[in-house]
Image (tube, rainbow, N blue to C red):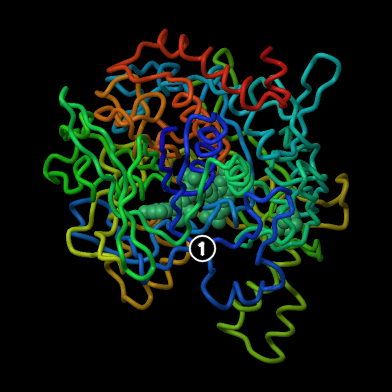
Amino acid sequence: MKRAIVVGSGPAGSTVARLLAKSGNYHVLILEKGRNYFTGLGGPTNKIGNLFSNDEIGWESRRSPITQDPLLEPRSFRTGPGAGKRTFVGDVNSLPTAVGGGTIHYDAKARRFREVDFITNSLMGGTPDKPAIPGTTYADWAMEYRHLEPFYAVMEEIVGVQGPARRVGRKIVNPNPYESWRSTPFAMPPGVAQLNSLLPSEAASRLGYHPAPVPTSINSRPYRGRPACVDCGFCLHYGCPNNAKGGGIWQLHDALRTGRAELRSEVNVVRVEHARGRGGRFRATGVTYMTPDGRTHTERADLVVLANSPIEAARLSFVSGIGQGHPNEKKISSAQPSDTDPSGLLGRNLMFHLQTTVLAVVNQDIHSFRGRTSTHTLDAFVGAGPSAKEFDPAVPRGGILEIGGNLNPVVEASEVAAFAYGARHKEYMQLGPFHKRLTTFTMQGEDMPQITNYVDLDPDIVDVYGVPVPRVSYQSHPYELAASAYYTPLMLAIMDAIGGPGSSYPSVRTLAALAINTTLPPALPGSIDAGVQQILSATPFNEIPASAHIMGTHRAALSPAHGPCDPYGRYWAFDNLYHAGGGLFATAPGYNVTLTIWALAYVVGAAIVSGVGGRRAYSKADVDRGQRRLLDVIRRLDGDTMIARALR
Ligand SMILES: Cc1cc2nc3c(=O)[nH]c(=O)nc-3n(C[C@H](O)[C@H](O)[C@H](O)COP(=O)(O)OP(=O)(O)OC[C@H]3O[C@@H](n4cnc5c(N)ncnc54)[C@H](O)[C@@H]3O)c2cc1C
Ligand code: SF4
């Protein structure tokens, strides 16, 4: 049996590990830097315990136990080489570090991209070598929606996604008109709606838009041995005490139950071992990791998958001598190929969503903090679509609106303590503008890929393990700033239309609505007091993107000229080294990213177990030809799903 190593146990790593272990051809070692907060993983039943209950105040007053500590493992940031070596050191888009990765504490919106999102560059008149939007590296994806659709479907069932599309006779009826076609309904119907999502949704409907319940990987009823959500109100930023949240954990459980997978937590992989073969091609031979006592260990493998998130996978490659960890800054607008990365693009085209938030405070208690963070979405501002025939390049590409949002009482009480104590604190909390009366829109705005937005190794700073930290060089492109400015007044108009006479909620009205954009005056960080900078870095008011949707350092492309990985996630110069995760995205459509990460990770795993891939370059016809064997993997390893039955 072959040995595979998967670095990272988040959604991407757990999905690949599950497929490799289920295939029967691999023994999989999953190496995870964070702690394991679950008991019973891999046991004979679905009775999994966790350590999340009744500690909400602790999670707020201490640093979250699952988030990377920016003092021990910082990242550095600058807008680009012109800003000096760095302008900030600390928390730069750090994702959680725990068994299960970022799905432990996320709020689980599980969105598909649309048909147009994979081919926007050509719909706008661009070509692979001439992007449609100047100053960007805008490109079509190596795969299209029709290729990914079955993988979206299978992952929705494996993870357990609730949503409104349902089967009526032979048809799938979807109340969200902005979404693309689907071959299966959601695994579960939507759960209970929240008032702070319903109020703006109702206002939007009166203005002619079509909001809908948001697909979410949270059980609305018992599913695959796990209970339904009880809308406890401590969802975003917290582990789920009753295991209703879908995430990487359940795929890990499946993998471990095969008896062909092993999970090691609290181990930090510090190097990918590799060697050059006769034909000049490279092979990963294993990895070296460090345990908390500071010792290093090397494990050998036939296959290595880096699923430790786009920034960390690029950093781990660089510290292992793969790609250019210290690119020539004077030539940063060009690719810088090397033997290990013939594309010269590893770490480039880093993308985050540009989040534009609109807040509204209403005149009465709408118990904003109860339930899941957001139960509805409005997709009207994501750009024209969903199919090519509805595409209009003149419509700005913004993003979905997550409707709802809140601060929970614990967070609000601790924030208010900064300026009000004793009786004043109590009065403020009784009013509770942010946990009782708030509703928000968060637009996940599409971010343009740029070759000059990238990860490399900081030349001076190392983390507590002695490993060079990743440095992020990033600046927003004028396109997404303009799209944000275009849609903000439309969002404010919806908030202003909440409640009042003629609505379903006549007694409710908006007291104040305001917009917050995560883009900021270019003067911040670097030109202000260091203490103030620390505070600002934790808010949206700085130029470090606030979004935790991280994409693009390992673009999957049809040829090495256009991205570091092939369509199936393999590093071009290697026979057996893969990336799984958001790094593979060619563009950053304005939707939550994790369902697409899941679907692509399934593709990566299916390609490995079915032997698809391995070419020096691909045509679109090659991708079409590989599809049949990828779909066989769904039929064989997930034959109990609706999509497997539909594919027969
Ligand atoms: C507050 C918040 C809310 C979010 N909400 C949503 C949402 O509603 N919907 C959505 O789609 N997405 C959401 N996301 C984003 C989502 O969490 C990520 O897209 C997702 O977790 C990425 O999956 P991944 O497997 O690629 O990486 P990760 O989940 O980041 O997993 C990577 C794992 O690798 C480990 N690792 C890193 N380096 C090493 C190393 N050297 N050695 C060993 N292990 C290593 C890390 O500890 C981590 O556990 C949210 C994120 C945050 C922070
Ligand atoms: S709201 Fe539901 S899914 Fe979220 S933590 Fe509470 S019980 Fe779990």
Q: Which residue is drawn at 43% across and 73% down?
A: 535
Label 1 residue SS:
loop
Q: Is residue 277 left or right of residue 132?
A: left
605 or 341, nearer to the observer:
605
Q: Where is residue 174 in the image (x, y as percent from the top left)?
A: 75, 26
* Quadrant occupied by the C terminus: top right
Q: Position of residue 404 (x, y in %)?
A: 70, 52
User: Farthest residue in the front direction?
Assistant: 1
52 or 268, nearer to the observer:
268
Question: Relative to residue 241, is residue 454 depicted above or below?
Answer: above
Question: Relative to residue 177, is residue 301 depicted above or below?
Answer: below
Q: Residue at x 60, y 39 (%)?
A: 258
Query: Quadrant holding ligand 2?
Result: bottom right
* Quadrant occupied by the N terminus: top left
Q: Is any atom of residue 394 visible in this view?
A: no
Question: Relative to residue 368, is residue 61 depicted above or below?
Answer: below
Q: Does the residue labelled 1 lie within 8 Å of ligand 1?
A: no
How many labels were placed on the picture? 1
3 or 572, nearer to the observer:
3
Q: Is any atom of residue 539 visible in this view?
A: yes
Q: Mark 1 points at which residue?
A: 35
**Quadrant of residue 386 in the image?**
top right
Q: Residues within 10 Å of mark 1 (few under 14, many from 20)?
A: some
User: What amino acid does circle 1 point to?
Assistant: Arg
Q: Residue at x 79, y 50 (%)?
A: 227
228 or 75, nearer to the observer:
228
Q: Which residue is drawn at 81% across and 14% down?
A: 170
Q: Position of residue 457 (x, y in %)?
A: 23, 53
User: Farthest residue in the bottom direction?
Assistant: 422
Q: In this view, does 33 lie to the left or right of 334?
A: right
Q: In this view, does 463 lie to the left or right of 153?
A: left
